[in-house]
Image: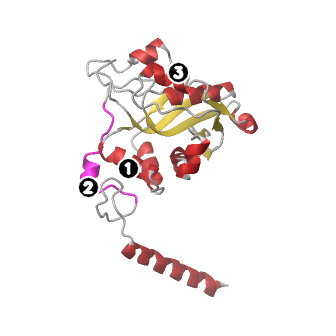
Amino acid sequence: MPGCSWAWRWWAAGAAQLAGVLMPPRCPACRALVAEPNRFCPECFATLPWRPEPACRRCALPLPPQAGGDEWCLGCRAEPPPFARAHAPFLYAGPIRAAILALKSGREEVAELLARMMLAGTEPPAAGALVVPVPLDRWRLLARGFNQAGLLARALARRAGLSCLPDALERVRATRSTRGLGRAERFRAAKGAFRARTDRREALAGASVLLVDDVMTTGATAAACARALRAAGARTVDVWVVARVAANVGAA
């Protein structure tokens, strides 16, 4: 009935206003009050750690200033990764690091902001590409209740007008914490930890895939996932992350 529709809109608008009073929008990084939801405050926006150039054309690792525009880092030159290219607009620092940690701690709405930032100022994804998140192992998923990469993948797909296949990949074994491990150790730990689900192989065959995660450290997880997607028949795999860890800036 028209009257019911009008009443529902009136109620929804009132509820939104009340929520805005009781829970005003805050910056996802510093928790300062902001004018609109899903926005950084002016101070945090001004200090966003945009990834510097030049960067490795394959894995997005920042390179020394003297490196040319078409350089690859030493790791990608020694062993080219199974993905075509990594897109990482930010370094894992400052307000971006705080926003990612807020997402992981349960502020699921932050995924919309980060997905928007991932798409800002970069070439659009390939038309018709499939968006696939890096999966969590089942115990971590049970403990957290959600996969932050899955939230980012869905938000990115919505904004880019693409299809998301959230369960295309699965972890076949949990990997131990890689904190403190070097590059080679991280790659060994991730090797063989992922596979494409059997019932998703038909959708992946011949597809261009955007593999989505929150942070890339060495690229070991992205490489293992990309290898599994390629084994399932994906034509190409591009990696899309919010931030790149660049602790080894200065090593080409």
Query: In the rendered structure, which segment of residues is drawn in magenta?
Result: 38-52
Q: Which mark is residue 188?
A: 3
Q: Percent position (x, y) of residue 172?
A: 65, 33
Q: Nearer the viewer, residue 250 or 236?
A: 250
Amino acid beneath label 2: Pro
Tell me residue 185's x, y (percent).
47, 21
Pick the quarter of the image with the C terminus: top left
**Picture residue at 33% right of the left edge, 53% below the top:** 29
Residue 41 sits in which quadrant?
bottom left
Among numbered discs 2 and 3, the one appearing first in the sequence:
2
Q: Nearer the viewer, residue 118 or 216?
A: 216
Q: Secondary structure beneath disc 2?
A: helix
Q: Is residue 160 above or below residue 38?
A: above
Distance, label 3 to label 1, CA atoms, is: 30 Å
Residue behind mark 2: 42
Query: What SS does tag 3 mark?
Result: helix
As for residue 76 lying within the magenta part, the answer is: no
**Label 1: how many residues lie within 10 Å, few (<14), some (14-19) or many (20+)?**
many
